[in-house]
């Protein structure tokens, strides 16, 4: 939560941004509860988790076709 506090201090309106709100709605669909606006760290944390899920996803149109290509893509990112 240390980075979420830093982000909230640096960008006070981040938890109200469209992207963070969308991540909060995704969390609501997944868990049934939406992080409240009064807890900006929880909302930003949901957004960071959502963004982390894309770390291993290749850019559109560049999907590796074979197992070896997928493994090489993951190694390249590390």
Image (cartoon, rainbow, N blue to C red):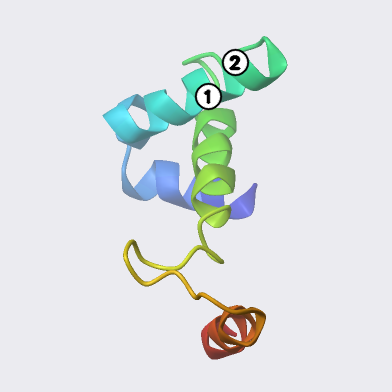
Q: Is residue 37 left or right of residue 68?
A: left
Along the line of sight, the residue nearer the viewer: 41 or 64: 64
When the figure is inspected, residue 55 is found, relative to residue 77, above or below; the finding is above
Residue 39 position, x and y percent, is 55, 22
For the residue pair 22 and 64, the one nearer the viewer reads as: 64
The reply, left or right, for residue 39 in relation to residue 12 is right
Mark 2, Cα crowd under 10 Å, few <14 / some 14-19 / many 20+, is: few
The percent coordinates of residue 58 (x first, y second) are: 45, 68
Instruction: Residue at 54%, 83% (x, y): give it.
Output: 73
Measured as percent of width and height from the top left, residue 46 is found at 57, 36
Q: Measured along the vertical axis of the image, is residue 76 above or below residue 12?
A: below
| Above or below for 23 versus 60 | above
* Pointers 2 and 1 in contact (C-beta within 8 Å): yes
Examine the image and state in which quarter residue 17 appears: top left
- Answer left or right for 75 relative to 12: right
C-alpha separation, residue under disc 2 versus residue under disc 1 = 5 Å
> Furthest-top residue in view?
32
> Which disc, if any, is residue 26?
1
Q: Residue at x 47, y 30 (%)?
A: 23
Task: Tell which of 76 and 60 is nearer to you.
Answer: 60
State the mark number for residue 29.
2
In what quadrant of the picture does the C terminus appear? bottom right
Q: Which mark is residue 2?
A: none
Badge 1 element: helix
């Amino acid at each position: 939560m240390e980075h979420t506090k830093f982000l909230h201090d640096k960008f006070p309106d981040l938890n109200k941004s469209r992207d963070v709100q969308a991540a909060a709605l995704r969390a609501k669909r997944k868990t049934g509860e939406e992080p409240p606006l009064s807890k900006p760290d929880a909302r930003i944390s949901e957004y960071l988790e959502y963004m982390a899920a894309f770390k291993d996803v290749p850019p559109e149109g560049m999907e590796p076709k074979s197992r070896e290509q997928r493994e090489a893509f993951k190694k390249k990112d590390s």
